[in-house]
Amino acid sequence: MSNTPKQRTTQVQPQQIVEERPETTDQPRRHRPPVRERAPTSLYPRVAPPRSTEAPERPAVAPAPEPVPRAKPAAAAHRQLVSLCPLPLVQLDTLGNVLWANDPFCEFVREDRDALLGRRVDETRLGVLYPTVLSELQTCAGQVAPPTIKQVLRFEERDGRSVTWLCWLAPETNAFGEVLRLFGYLHPLSEQL
């Protein structure tokens, strides 16, 4: 054996290029299995390292430290955006129970947040203004990939003003199109915030 290093070339000869053979009409195209990594099989048996009674050797390179999980700044910004939103927002389960509500929603239904959480939405002021909310919500929850429910609410405020609000109930679905929960958005159409 020679100890001379192999010479490296920077030029590629045409016979060194490996290509697919052009298809001919008389030969069917053969299916090539995907290239797989070397796995333990009868050709490549799994070899366990011999057990030793001595202390294990330290690796030459220390393993990288585990990354420290940090709160994503975007998550905090999203929470702040939702909590500071001037529009009434509510999260409902598929049975119509209130899971979460922001302050403007609590003001809209005229209830305290602690008393509101866990109650069915049809038992709130929204249920009075929108009497079919529970049946529409349950119909939506029973469908696969349902559309957003939109309802116009017209009512008089305490001071006698006639106002119009738009209520959106947007379903959140899983990968199979089943409804997990619904997000409610209320938007005034006839007055300024």
Image: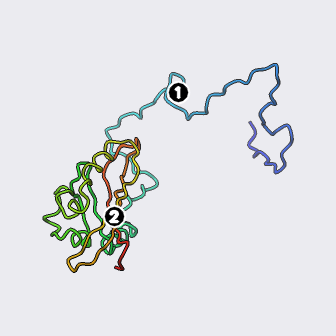
Up/down of 30 relative to 36, above or below: above
Give amino acid for label 1: Tyr
In the current view of this chain or complex, which residue is farthest to the left?
115
What residue does disc 2 label?
A: 185
In the current view of this chain or complex, which residue is farthest to the right?
14
Q: Earlier in the sequence, mark 2 or mark 1?
A: 1
Up/down of 175 relative to 27, above or below: below
Is disc 1 surrounded by few (<14), some (14 to 19) or many (20+) residues within 10 Å? few
**Where is residue 17 shown, x and y percent of the image?**
80, 39
- Report the front residue among 111 and 24: 111
Q: What's the residue at 33%, 62% (across, down)?
A: 167
**Where is residue 40 shown, x and y percent of the image?**
49, 29
Q: Is residue 158 left or right of residue 25?
A: left
Q: What's the residue at 30%, 52% (across, down)?
A: 181
Q: Which mark is residue 44?
A: 1
Mark 2 secondary-structure assignment? strand
Mark 1 secondary-structure assignment? loop
- Report the front residue among 83 and 19: 83
Q: Is residue 175 left or right of residue 3?
A: left
Give amino acid for label 2: Tyr
Q: What's the residue at 46%, 29% (across, down)?
A: 46
**Where is residue 115 shown, x and y percent of the image?**
13, 64
